[in-house]
Image (tube, rainbow, N blue to C red):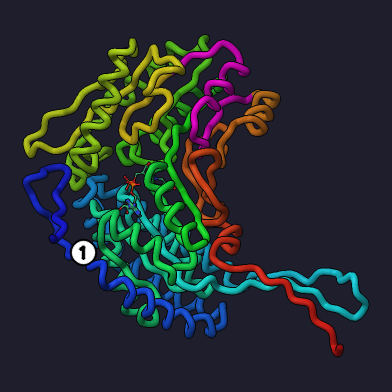
């Protein structure tokens, strides 16, 4: 059955239809990728970098069309979709810039006359499984390091937003060797079959914790390498700040970008009790000033949620939080719109306590919870009291507090006096239930995931 995509701002409108790949085609696709990969591995790595550069150029030329398809399919404002495409291409270029970096090292030997070296080889055929919220940048973070290190890649989009990857396939067909990058459209069952396929050497997955566990089990069943990038429940600790307005602007952006549907979205503001009232008021004013509209509207700051399921889930979290004793300082309900879109009011909840569901589970929507604390011990204890460990932020200008945060905050990415936006060339990393494995996305550590390591011992004669 074909996959129909509805406009989240006006769901009666079908914006795209895709034919899923039949499960019977997987053997062929994996074999085709392997054949392409064997030849690609013989291309010198700097030359691979040039070819991938041309692929990125083609994507850049097509940026407006890619962004438009993202907005139509999952609803984020066009400015955010254009930003996603531009940032992803910047990340891709940062990875290509590593094409001439060393691939191993020379070590001293215990045996006279022996040269000991480590080298790296491509893994083979890599599988990238992607979520719907960043349908272009997530696959780019997988594809570019996979290709630069000599692998072929199969990319599976979410069935909510395949359009960006369909356009990526077109750019690949025009610039890359045949079969090297293949987009495989389909749902979870197809993803599961791919993970279990013995021809897949490594699986890089981005999505929810529950699906991540299934993906890991399927990949491990044939001992494929695995990288999981999962959810978050990202805190900001707001202790002291000489420019509170600026801090609140940054927190608002980090909480409500992409309608809160970012794995790195700030969802808990853990604030010192002395400034909690001012912070709650400031955040509520900022949230109330954001009016969700169709993402194609000029100047749109927030679009609808991506699906009716998302809308019901977000509303359920807020309804239960209010029943548990939280109060809505802003928002707190679905919004009516002429097209019946999946709109939710940007929401700030106060009187939230650390044990409430909304303070512990990933909401993945425009909902910010304010939790008070008395001292930094309590703040860190609240921040760390969740299963996730993706990103965390601190606002403080006191060195001892900054040092404690950097040493004790349980997250992969730590930001001091800044929102939770990652940079292009830096590893995108999580701990606890937010991630498993090293090097799935961006930064120097990608070499560890996308290559195998080999130790060489060499003597001039026996
Ligand atoms: P999801 O886990 O429902 O789906 C992700 C992908 O997995 C989709 O392509 C889906 O078709 C596929 N899938 C589903 N079942 C499968 C199975 N059994 N085997 C193989 N593949 C299967 O996630 P989502 O709803 O698309 O995205 C939202 C989630 O992704 C949130 O939890 C969010 O935090 C997380 N996310 C994490 C990051 C990160 O880098 N840490 C980035 C973006 C999103």
**For residue 170, side relative to residue 442 (left or right):** left
Callout 1 secondary element: loop
How many numbered marks appear? Answer: 1
- Do we see residue 274 in this rendering? yes
Between 2 and 443, the one lying in front of the other is 2
Residue drawn 24% across the image and 48% down it? 74
Q: Position of residue 324 (x, y in %)?
A: 33, 13
Q: Quadrant of residue 257?
A: top left
Circle 1 is placed at which residue position?
Answer: 20
Q: Position of residue 288 (x, y in %)?
A: 27, 24
Q: Position of residue 26 (x, y in %)?
A: 31, 71
Instruction: Give the residue furthest to the bottom.
Output: 461
Q: Quadrant of residue 102?
A: bottom right
Which span of residues is magenta-colored? 371-397
Residue drawn 86% across the image and 90% down it? 461
Up/down of 238 relative to 364, above or below: above
Up/down of 54 relative to 357, above or below: below
């Amino acid at each position: 059955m074909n996959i129909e995509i509805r406009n989240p701002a006006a769901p009666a409108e079908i914006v795209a239809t895709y034919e899923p790949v039949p499960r019977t085609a997987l053997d062929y696709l994996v074999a085709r990728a392997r054949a392409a990969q064997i030849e690609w591995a013989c291309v010198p790595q700097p030359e691979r970098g040039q070819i991938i550069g041309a692929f990125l150029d083609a994507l850049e030329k097509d940026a407006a069309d890619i962004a438009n398809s993202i907005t139509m399919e999952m609803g984020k404002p066009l400015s955010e979709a254009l930003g996603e495409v531009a940032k992803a291409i910047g990340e891709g270029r940062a990875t290509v810039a590593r094409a001439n970096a060393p691939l191993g090292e020379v070590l001293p030997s215990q045996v006279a006359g022996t040269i000991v070296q480590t080298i790296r080889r491509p893994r083979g055929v890599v599988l990238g499984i992607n979520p719907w919220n960043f349908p272009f940048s997530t696959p780019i973070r997988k594809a570019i390091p996979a290709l630069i290190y000599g692998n072929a890649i199969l990319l599976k989009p979410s069935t909510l937003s395949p359009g960006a990857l369909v356009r990526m396939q077109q750019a690949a067909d025009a610039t890359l060797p045949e079969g090297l990058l293949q987009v495989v459209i389909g749902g979870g069952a197809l993803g599961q079959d791919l993970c279990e396929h013995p021809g897949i050497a490594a699986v890089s997955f981005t999505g929810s914790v529950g699906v991540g566990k299934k993906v890991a089990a399927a990949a491990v069943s044939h001992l494929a390498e695995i990288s999981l990038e999962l959810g978050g429940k990202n805190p900001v600790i707001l202790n002291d700040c000489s420019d509170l307005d600026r801090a609140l602007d940054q927190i608002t952006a980090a909480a409500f970008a992409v309608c809160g549907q970012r794995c790195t979205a700030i969802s808990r503001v853990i604030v010192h009790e002395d400034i909690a009232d001012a912070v709650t008021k400031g955040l509520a004013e900022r949230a109330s000033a954001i009016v969700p509209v169709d993402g194609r509207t000029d100047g749109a700051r927030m679009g609808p949620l991506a699906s009716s399921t998302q809308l019901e889930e977000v509303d359920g979290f807020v309804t239960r939080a209010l029943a548990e004793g939280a109060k809505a300082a802003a928002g707190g309900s679905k919004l009516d719109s002429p097209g019946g879109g999946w709109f939710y009011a940007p929401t700030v909840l106060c009187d939230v306590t650390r044990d409430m569901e909304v303070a512990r589970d990933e909401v993945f929507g425009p909902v910010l919870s304010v939790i008070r604390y008395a001292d930094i011990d309590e703040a860190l204890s609240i921040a760390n009291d969740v299963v996730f460990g993706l990103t965390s932020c601190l606002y403080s200008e006191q060195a001892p507090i900054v040092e404690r945060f950097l040493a004790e905050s349980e997250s992969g990415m730590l930001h001091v006096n800044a929102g939770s936006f990652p940079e292009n060339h830096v590893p995108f990393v999580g701990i606890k239930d937010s991630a498993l494995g090293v090097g799935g996305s961006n930064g120097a550590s990608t070499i560890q995931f996308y290559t195998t390591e080999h130790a060489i011992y060499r003597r001039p004669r026996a």
